[in-house]
Amino acid sequence: MKVVAYVRGNDSRTNERVRHFGEALGAEFRVREDPVDCDLAIQAGFQISPAMKSAMDSGTPIIILENPVWHYGDKPATYTFGYNGLNGLAFVPESKFRPARPKPTLQPWREPFSGQITVFGQVEHDKALRGADIEAWVARVQAVIPEAVFRQHPIMVGQNDPPLGPFEDVLANTSLAITYTSTVGAEAVIAGIPTISCHEGSLAYAVSSHGLGDAPITPSRSEWIHELSWRHWSTDETLDTNYILSGYEEARSRAERGEYDNMSNGRDQ
């Protein structure tokens, strides 16, 4: 099997993730702008580069490496992986019967209306939104739950805006979190905060309510975080290539049918 791992042409730290993952799979390394035919294409970041366009045009499975939910002091050194998409809309192999991996300790569930209701924003036009208008979404949420407090994404805070308070303080005060696809949803679930995730691209979608009219739900989080731990890898550990490649055939079947997550902001890819 020919595996190609595509790096950025600049000195990006995401290249460390690609090299760690690609070396474990015996990949050939190329820059994103120089695609070649292959059986599996790897890239850090959910963007249609020439490499990803070439792979999708030919029905080749892809693996996207992205930012983690948790890390161990150096965020760029930890990443998640998924076939043919991003986060909740990526395919990952079954991990139920695999051994435990490092992961945060799940905190007890909070009473959902015992504290602040927080709506978490995201970066406008981010590919994780898959074409959604995040400002319009926030407005709809606040129209339904006017008492909810909006937490802007740090990148979206302007020079003339008041500074954001510490994220840790927001989590400490929140008893109900509302997100679209942000990884904050998964962080909130780990912290024991009942969460509403409004799009299945969220990593918290499986253990959260899915709409503003639904009461928060609390299924077992232990299986969820076990699976999430098998998505998380650090550049200082040995990748379990048998686990990664156990999903290849299914990912290839999906790719051949054109079943890729939409990374074109909702437009045709």
Image (tube, rainbow, N blue to C red):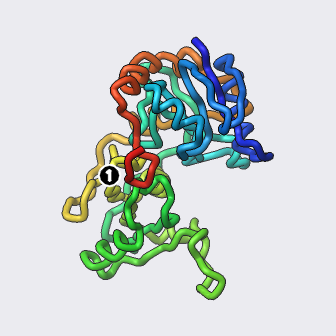
Q: Residue at coordinates 66% horizontally, 83% vertically from top-left?
A: 159
Give the answer, above or below, for where 266 lies relative to 168.
above
> Considering depth in this image, is 51 or 89 the residue closer to the camera?
51
Which residue extends farthest left? 213
Q: Is residue 133 left or right of residue 159?
A: left
In the rendered image, residue 115, in percent from the top left (x then y), is placed at 38, 73
Q: Residue at coordinates 64% horizontally, 45% vertically from top-left?
A: 71
In the rendered image, residue 168, in percent from the top left (x then y), is placed at 57, 66
Total tally of numbered discs in the picture: 1
Q: Secondary structure at mark 1?
A: loop
Q: Is residue 199 left or right of residue 98?
A: left
Q: Is residue 229 left or right of residue 72?
A: left
Would you name the residue on which mark 1 appears?
208
Quarter of the image for the C terminus: give it. Answer: top left
Which residue extends farthest right? 11
Q: Does any portion of residue 110 appear in the rendered image?
A: yes
Three-letter residue code for mark 1: Ser
Q: Is residue 73 left or right of residue 169?
A: right
Q: Residue at coordinates 28% horizontally, 76% vertically from top-left?
A: 145
Q: Residue at coordinates 59% horizontally, 18% vertically from top-left?
A: 241
The part of the image, by quadrant, that contains residue 42 is top right
The part of the image, by quadrant, that contains residue 88 is top left
Which residue extends farthest top? 1
Quarter of the image for the N terminus: give it. Answer: top right
In the rendered image, residue 178, in percent from the top left (x then y), is placed at 37, 64
> Considering depth in this image, is 241 or 132 the residue closer to the camera?
132
For disc 1, the neighbor class at 10 Å (few under 14, some 14 to 19, many from 20) is: many
Q: Does any portion of residue 115 appear in the rendered image?
A: no
In the rendered image, residue 123, in percent from the top left (x then y), is placed at 52, 65
